[in-house]
Amino acid sequence: MDERLRAIRELRTQEKAEFHGEFVDFDPVYSWPKPVQRPHPPIYVGGGEGAFPRVAALGDAWLANGVPPGQLGPQIARMRNTAGRDVPVTVYGVPADPAVIEGYARLDVERLLFSLPTVPEAETLTHLDRFAEVAGRFR
């Protein structure tokens, strides 16, 4: 994964990209269009504590998988300590529960992504209405 992220960075930032690693290997190539964001769009690294070194070395943000706020706070501290900087955090798989969202807000989590089940359209619309109602409380 580290090599892939490094190769993607090369492709996004170099006019003529080249990468030679153990798992990713390509001679000089051109890749267009280049991203508008400079030097490249942010790289969100997902995973648990085993991913913290990758966040530190290659990531711009950490993507946490639905870890409850009570457990996430200490993990954020350890991740930021590993990274040596204030890394933004996004949590996905979050329920539309105001109490849970408030817990994440207290941790200064940058972004929450609700979990939307795959259900028939009418149920999906009900879920989306609930998301809109709950999210509207936190604007």
Image (cartoon, rainbow, N blue to C red):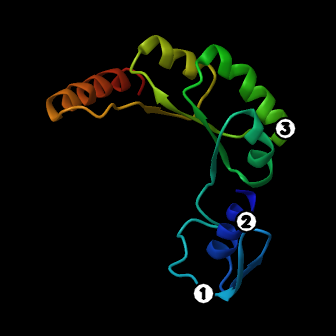
Q: Nearer the viewer, mark 3 or mark 2?
A: 2
Q: Which residue is mark 1?
A: 30
Q: Is residue 36 above or below residue 100?
A: below
Q: Is residue 132 left or right of residue 4?
A: left
> Residue type at mark 2?
Arg
Residue visible at 64% across and 13% down in the picture:
70
Residue placed furthest toward the left: 122
Give me the C-alpha separation between circle 1 and circle 3.
34 Å
Give me the C-alpha separation between circle 1 and circle 2.
16 Å
Asked if labels 3 and 1 touch by Cβ distance under 8 angstroms, the answer is no
Q: Is residue 38 above or below residue 121?
A: below
Picture coordinates of residue 4, whole percent (x, y) = 68, 64
Give me the C-alpha separation between circle 3 and circle 2.
19 Å
> In the picture, residue 9 is in which quadrant?
bottom right
Mark 3 surroundings within 10 Å by alpha-carbon count, few (fewer than 14), some (14 through 19), many (20 or more): some
Mark 3 and mark 2 lie on one chain; the one further toward the N terminus is 2
What's the mark number on residue 82?
Answer: 3
Is disc 3 placed on a helix, strand or loop? helix
Q: Is residue 62 above or below residue 119?
A: below
Picture coordinates of residue 83, whole percent (x, y) = 81, 42
Q: Is residue 51 left or right of residue 105?
A: right
Q: Is residue 117 left or right of residue 23?
A: left
> Residue type at mark 3?
Thr
What's the mark number on residue 6?
Answer: 2
Is disc 1 placed on a helix, strand or loop? loop
Is disc 2 placed on a helix, strand or loop? helix
> Residue type at mark 1?
Tyr
Residue visible at 52% across and 81% down in the picture:
32
Q: Quadrant of the N terminus?
A: bottom right
> In the picture, residue 78 is in which quadrant?
top right
Mark 1 and mark 2 lie on one chain; the one further toward the N terminus is 2
